Image: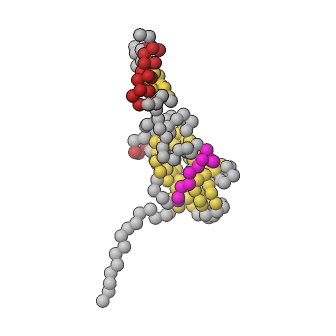
Amino acid sequence: MKGTQKLFVLLTLLVLAFGFVPLFAQRLPYKGLDWLAYESIMYYGDDYEPDNSQGEAKPFLVNDPYQTHTFHTSGDQDWISFAAEVGTYYTIRTWANPLGSLADTVLELFDSNGQPVSGDDDSGPGTDARLQFQAVYTGVYYVRVTEWADRYGTAYWYYLQVTEAGAVRMYLPLILRSYP
């Protein structure tokens, strides 16, 4: 059986077994396995998809816990929007490398008209992105996150968080004493 015939059989088995046709195929790194020319791969988007443009940006509540995003296709970008108050400092950060992800995130901040305000790549730790800015108007800002080398797949995920700079993120127990 020739390589293309075996590939067709493999794809047919995948359709019968899993009910889908693979959307992506990558060459296998193996030599001498010409009968298995391609490895079929299906990557699924995160819970916030579609969010690939400013118009599809999902709202993010400042000081809320992080969101988990993935880079699941080539050219994938994730957009969020958040409400800011004039004069307030905000920190936008991603983190992936300390958690075992291979993602190298790049952050870009845009105003409500889509004009770039700020950006960051690798302010850390490692190749994670982090930026701080002071809001110059009360209203909506947008954040775009991309993968620096346009890599994607199950190993390319990250956490995203927007907080007020200096905001308390941990609550300590309050102990009250009564005096006689």
Q: Is residue 68 above or below residue 133?
A: above
Q: Quadrant of residue 59?
A: bottom right
Outermost left residue: 180
179 left or right of 165?
A: left
User: Considering the image in quadrants, where does the C terminus appear?
Assistant: bottom left
Toward the viewer: 118 or 63? Answer: 63
- At horizontal 55% and vertical 44% (from top left) the residue drawn is 50
Foreground of the two, 125 or 25: 25
- Number of labels in the image equals 0
Can you see residue 106? Answer: no
Residue 161 in the image, given as x and y percentages of width and height: 49, 53
Q: Is residue 151 left or right of residue 56?
A: left
Q: Position of residue 137 (x, y in %)?
A: 66, 61
Q: Which residue is located at x 42 percent, y 41 percent? A: 101
Q: In the rendered structure, does residue 143 fall within the stretch colored magenta? A: no
Farthest residue, direction bottom = 180
The residue positioned 43% from the left and 37% from the top of the image is: 155
Residue pictured at 56% horizontal, 41% vertical: 77
Read off the magenta span: 53-62
Can residue 33 be seen here? The reply is yes
Residue 16, above or below 72: above
Q: Residue furthest top?
A: 1
In depth, the one of 79 and 48 nearer the eye is 48
* Protein image colouring: secondary structure
Residue 18's spot in the image, x, y percent? 41, 31
In the rendered image, which quarter contains the N terminus? top left
The stretch drawn in magenta includes residue 58: yes
